[in-house]
Each structure stands twice: as structure tokens, then as C-alpha cells.
Amino acid sequence: MSCPRCEKGSNRRSVLKEILRWAAALSGIALIHPLLRFSGYTIKPKPRYVKISAPLPRSGVHAERDFFLFAGPDRHTAWAVSRTCTHLGCRVNFLEDKQLIECPCHQSRFTPQGQRLAGPAQKNLPVFPVEVQLDENGGVTGYMVTV
Ligand code: FES
């Protein structure tokens, strides 16, 4: 025979145990994240594919929110450069007349290939892989950028 008071106490204890178990699990997760960051371990985000249809503008430059797509004169060579400044993360602009990428925040400058030229940014702009898509006659139909 069971007493009702004992069952009530047992239920409270089991609920408290469950809450403590969840709190311990959440604390563990909260501690693991900074440890992983400190150790330099990063989880790579899934790549994002952006298709740019041909033809590109005459300048050979196409601006997206995250990157610039540059194409050579024959349009069969192309590269994509990040628009996020390596200094403090502002979105950079391409100055077509000077053939430079410039950051509006602190005027870091980069070549169209993303090489750092001047300014407080210490690193080059990241370059993203580009796949030139061709039709059966070898004409360019588009560009697939992996961001
Ligand atoms: S954020 Fe680009 S130069 Fe400072």
C-alpha cells in the first residue's frame, strides 16, 4: 500500500531531478562553446551557391550583397571577391574608374583580386570559387559562385 504523501514527494523529487539534469546539460553546452572557440575549432557553415546569369555588364563586374564577381575580357575566366572588409566588417565598394575596391568606413583599399593595398585592414579580402558555366558551343551561360 502506498501513501499519497510519499507519492507526491517522489513526484517532486523526480521533477527536481529532471530540472537539474537539464540545467547540467545546458551548462555543459554553455561551457563547450567557448572552449571550442578558444581551441580554434570552427564549424564550417554549409556553402551557399549563387548563380549569376550571363551576360555580365560591359565592365565585367557584377555586384551582389556578399561579393563582387569579376570576369576577364573573354568572360571565360572569373573570380569573386568578398564585400566584407577584413578590418571591421563594413561592406566595400568597387570604384570602377580607379579599378579599386575601397572600404567606406576607414578607406582600406584592395585590388579587384582582393589583395590589400592600403588602410587599416591587415588581410586580403577572401576570394570565393567560381565555376564558369558553358553551353554546348562553349558560350558562357552563367557563373556559379560558392560563398
Ligand atoms: S572597416 Fe573597412 S577599413 Fe575599417
Image (cartoon, grey):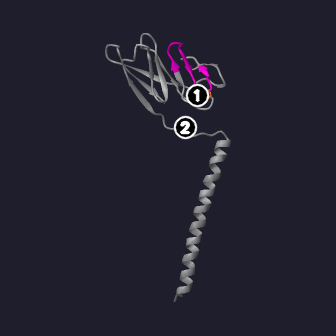
Q: Quadrant of ligand 1?
A: top right
Circle 1 SS class: loop
Task: Give the amino acid at mark 1.
Answer: Cys
**Above or below: residue 136 compared with residue 38:** above
Q: Main secondary structure of the magenta part?
A: loop
Q: Is residue 29 left or right of residue 1?
A: right
Question: Mark 2: is the Cβ under 8 angstroms from ligand 1?
Answer: no
Circle number at residue 85: 1
N-terminal of the pair, mark 1 or mark 2, is 2
**Above or below: residue 145 compared with residue 5:** above
**Above or below: residue 21 compared with residue 143:** below
Is 103 magenta? The answer is yes
Residue 22 in percent (x, y) is at 57, 62
Residue 94 in percent (x, y) is at 51, 20
Residue 50 in percent (x, y) is at 42, 29
Residue pointed to by mark 2: 44
Is 97 magenta? The answer is yes
* Range covered by the magenta-colored residues: 94-109
The one nearer the camera, 3 or 125, is 125
Q: Residue at (64%, 42%) from the top-left corner?
A: 37
Circle 2 SS class: loop
Q: Is residue 12 left or right of residue 31?
A: left
Residue furthest out toward the left:
136
